[in-house]
Image: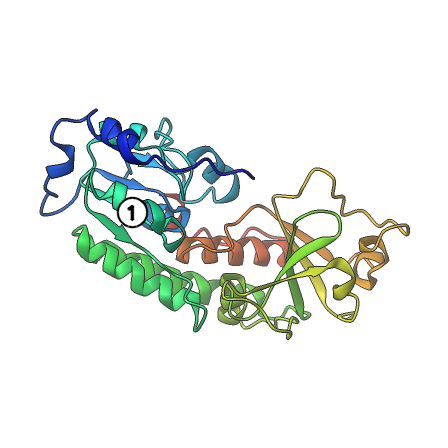
């Protein structure tokens, strides 16, 4: 994907001119008008019951993330790492939230409104715990501490309920993957969001090879072959050129799990998300293996 260059110099000045005094605006004690560029932070803000006035790549959020849903008509403010200053300035935000990936845009954004960085993935530890910490910090900044605690409590209760839902079901080891194209996949290890959800469900992650700071390994499909006893979980969206049907002429079709029909496909869930993403993944996984609809997590549908 090609990423347009960020506005600089006189272009930035022109963008800020759209809102008189934008460069000198002071944040409200409790910010109410919030622009969010990062999808994980967007989900956190929505889980706190806040309706952002602008979101980066809003249309793609609806495809890749989905829950918590954006309000209809939420403005798209450009790309997540190179947002449109012209789109953001007229919204008169009290706060702009970015991720480390969007750090380059921060100096320009700070001339419009105070900015805050939300970072869930540090390359170490449990991303679900990091997500809880970031959620609570964000809640403190927006006056939503009680709401954040309710989100965490509800997540713990849903994971416990989903474990009970699986009681008595003989579960195999799992390989959780997403296709990049016909030949390459991301495999999510224990330090990923999906890996953390498996752990909370008491399920075994079959992938024991090294992963990157985001908790996944980028490998060719053939690297899945040694995990002959594992069931494969494919998370959408699926590239248009990929088919999950057995095909003896393809690397995928010759995997033992594929030949034996041990593949589950789940609806799109953001793999680098927050607690609501982990709950969505866990709920969809349990439904796929139990054949019945699991309990709704509630806060994931705000």
- Of 154 and 92, which appears nearest the observer? 92
Does residue 26 sit above or below 250 in this rendering? above
Residue at 55% over, 71% down: 190
- Can residue 153 be seen here? The reply is no
Q: Position of residue 185 (x, y in %)?
A: 67, 55
Measured as percent of width and height from the top left, residue 235 is found at 61, 51
Q: How is the image coloured?
A: rainbow
x and y, in percent, of residue 131 in the image: 36, 61
Of 187 and 174, the residue lying toward us: 187
Q: Determine crowd level at label 1: few under 14, some 14-19, many 20+ residues with C-alpha closer than 10 A.
A: many
Query: Image quarter for residue 273?
Result: bottom left
User: Does 118 sit left or right of 196 as displayed?
Assistant: left
Single out the residue that lies furthest toward the top. 18
Q: How many marks?
A: 1
Q: Is residue 213 in sight in this rendering? A: yes
Vertical placement of 210 versus 50: above or below? below
**Which residue is found at the position 19% from the left and 46% from the top?**
114
Give percent across and percent down for residue 192.
51, 65
Q: Quadrant of the C terminus?
A: top left
Helix, strand, or loop for circle 1? helix
Instruction: Pick the residue in front: 84 or 53.
Output: 84
Q: Quadrant of the N terminus?
A: top right
Residue at the location (51% across, 70% down)?
191
Which residue is the site of mark 1? 106
Q: Residue at x 46, y 35 (%)?
A: 4
Q: Residue furthest right?
A: 248
């Amino acid at each position: 994907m090609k990423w347009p260059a960020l506005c600089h110099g006189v272009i930035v000045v022109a963008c800020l001119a759209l809102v008189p005094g934008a460069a000198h605006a002071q944040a409200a004690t409790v910010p109410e008008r919030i622009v969010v560029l990062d999808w994980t932070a967007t989900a956190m803000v929505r889980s706190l019951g806040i309706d952002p006035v602008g979101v980066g790549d809003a249309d793609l959020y609806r495809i890749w993330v989905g829950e918590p849903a954006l309000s209809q008509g939420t403005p798209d403010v450009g790309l997540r790492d190179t947002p449109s200053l012209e789109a953001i300035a007229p919204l008169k935000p009290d706060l702009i939230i970015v991720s480390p990936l969007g750090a380059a845009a921060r100096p320009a954004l700070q001339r419009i409104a105070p900015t805050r960085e939300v970072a869930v993935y540090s390359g170490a530890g449990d991303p679900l715990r990091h997500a809880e910490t970031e959620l609570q910090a964000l809640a403190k900044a927006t006056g939503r501490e009680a709401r954040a605690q309710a989100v965490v409590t509800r997540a713990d209760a849903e994971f416990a309920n989903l474990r009970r839902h699986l009681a008595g079901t003989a579960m195999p080891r799992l390989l959780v993957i997403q296709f990049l194209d016909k030949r390459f996949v991301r495999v999510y290890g224990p330090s990923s969001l999906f890996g953390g959800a498996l752990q909370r469900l008491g399920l075994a992650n079959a992938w024991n090879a090294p992963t990157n700071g985001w908790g996944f390994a980028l490998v060719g499909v053939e690297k899945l072959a040694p995990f002959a006893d594992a069931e494969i979980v494919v998370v959408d969206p699926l590239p248009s050129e990929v088919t999950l049907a057995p095909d003896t002429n393809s690397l995928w079709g010759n995997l033992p799990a594929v030949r034996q029909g041990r593949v589950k496909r789940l609806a799109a869930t953001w793999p680098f998300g927050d607690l609501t993403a982990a709950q969505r993944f866990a709920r969809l996984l349990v439904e796929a293996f139990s054949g019945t609809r699991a309990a709704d997590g509630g806060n994931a549908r705000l």
